[in-house]
Image: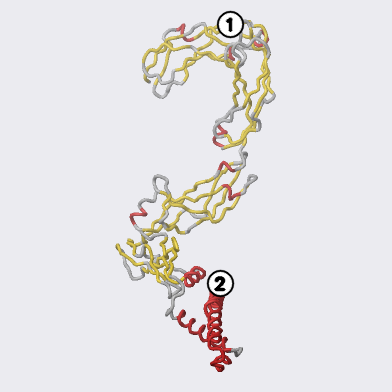
Amino acid sequence: MKKIFKAIFKFFATIFKWLYKVIDVGIITPLSKAAYFISDKLGNKNGALDKFLNKPNTLIYVSLIFAFAMFLAVDRKIINLVETEAIVLSNQPIVAEYNEEAFVVEGIPEGADIVLMGRKSDLYLAEQLGDHKLTLDLTDYSAGTHKINIKYNNPIKTLDYKVDPSRVTLVIYPKISESKTLTTDILNTDKLNSTLVISSVKLDKDEIIIKSYKEKLETVANVKALVDVNALNATTAGTYTLENVKLIAYDEKGTEIKDVEIIPESVTATVVVSSPSKVVPVQVVPVGDVASGSAISSITSNVSTVTLYGDEEALKSIDDIKVRIDVNGLSKDKSFQETIVKPNGVRSMSDTAITIKVKMEGETSKEFKNIPLEFENLDTSKFRALAKSESDTKVDVVVKGVSSLLNKLNAEDIKAYVDLSNLETGTYEVPVIVTGSDLKLKYSSRTIKIEVVISKK
């Protein structure tokens, strides 16, 4: 109401200023000039007129009479001193009036343009009031396709108007409901503290109701509660309650479906934030062959273990962290600065860099005889494998390195095997692979390949 009074006051103030200027310039000044001109011409011939015009109030009375006559002419539009103009109110919202519990309506435009035509003063008042309403009255319509006129309340009756579009085609459907199981989608997990994880999310409702017309409900694949990590403000492990969690309906391609009513519109989520961790050793793996006649005597590092933070299931499968260093052609002591690569499923580590020192000595060798051969990566539920000859069941292994390490090595520390991955029934010649517990030593089999016979169980 205060806004309306302010607009009306401003409107009349503008009118009075304009009228004052018109009266002063267009009436009083010309009338005064005319009176003095007539008086000058008549001179003493008509003393009565001269006396009348010289009275102080004469010109004021005459001016008021002319001003009142001008006001009536303008007010009743006998004289139009202002040109007709037009303004466009773009994209005005449309309100559809119908029984939302019983029907769903498709085709309602988001907005329409209103073209107002009339005097500038009226147009100004219409813009100031801002009380423009576009409605679609569907209360008397049933299910089906209908062409409906858009109604405009037109608060300034002196203005002409046009609505674009003025008529729309709508489809009215009977509304039905369906029950859906609610699932959870966690957003912005990368914004959570790197040492924390979302362990569980429990919603206060497992089932919700969706409402729309039949064909639309058939496109709904799932309804998800969007739990936003940013809204948790979680800085430590604990249980957090998140209210007004938004529910969204999606189709089978993961596209949001907007024209579906979801009851309730939101739920409350109880979110458990934990900090699973695991301490694992760091294993330095030399890669490549050192210079001939040289061997690695020791490998030391400033980081022997790291603490991993991440998904609990992922941590279970990690027993160590391997850091590889290139020792190809190495013949003297060397320090390495390496990055510790974060395994999959790990969000954070206590250390990400490591300094490794390698010491070199002269190389010697030692032979270990009759190391038993093992079969690896065979599907033992379907097949069994045997060496083709007795001589292929064991191999002799030569180990090279510094004498101090070789003296500590036992035959039990050496593993000789053949890889039978993706092999089925038949006879195959496969390479012998040898590894040992001490990675600073080099292991090789005197027997390079053996024959293996694979048969079905």
Q: Which residue is mark 2?
A: 3
> With respect to residue 31, does 113 lie above or below?
above
Using the image as rendered, state which of residue 204 and residue 37 is in the foreground.
Answer: 37
- Find the distance from the CA under tag 1 to the CA under tag 2: 102 Å
User: Disc 1, disc 2: CB below 8 Å?
Assistant: no
Count of marks placed on residues: 2
Give the percent coordinates (x, y) of residue 26: 52, 77
Q: Please report whichever mark, 1 or 2, sits nearer to the chain's N-terminal start.
A: 2
Q: Nearer the viewer, mark 1 or mark 2?
A: 2
> With respect to residue 44, does 445 lie above or below?
above
Using the image as rendered, state which of residue 337 and residue 204 is in the foreground.
Answer: 337
Label 2 crowding class (10 Å Cα cut-off): few <14, some 14-19, many 20+?
A: few
290 on left or right of 182: right
Using the image as rendered, state which of residue 30 and residue 307 is in the foreground.
Answer: 30
| Image quadrant where residue 403 sits | top right
Give the percent coordinates (x, y) of residue 82: 46, 72
Q: Amino acid at mark 2?
A: Lys
Q: Which residue is mark 1?
A: 367
Q: Identify the secondary structure beneath mark 1.
A: strand
Q: Amino acid at mark 1?
A: Glu
Give the percent coordinates (x, y) of residue 370: 53, 8
> With respect to residue 453, does 119 lie above or below?
below
> With respect to residue 323, does 99 lie above or below?
below
| Image quadrant where residue 315 sits | top right
Using the image as rendered, state which of residue 445 and residue 227 is in the foreground.
Answer: 227
Residue at figure coordinates x 63%, y 44% from the top left: 237
Q: Identify the secondary structure beneath mark 2.
A: helix
- Residue 150 visible in the displayed image: yes
Q: Residue furthest bottom?
A: 48
Q: Residue furthest right?
A: 302
Disc ID at residue 110: none
325 on left or right of 175: right
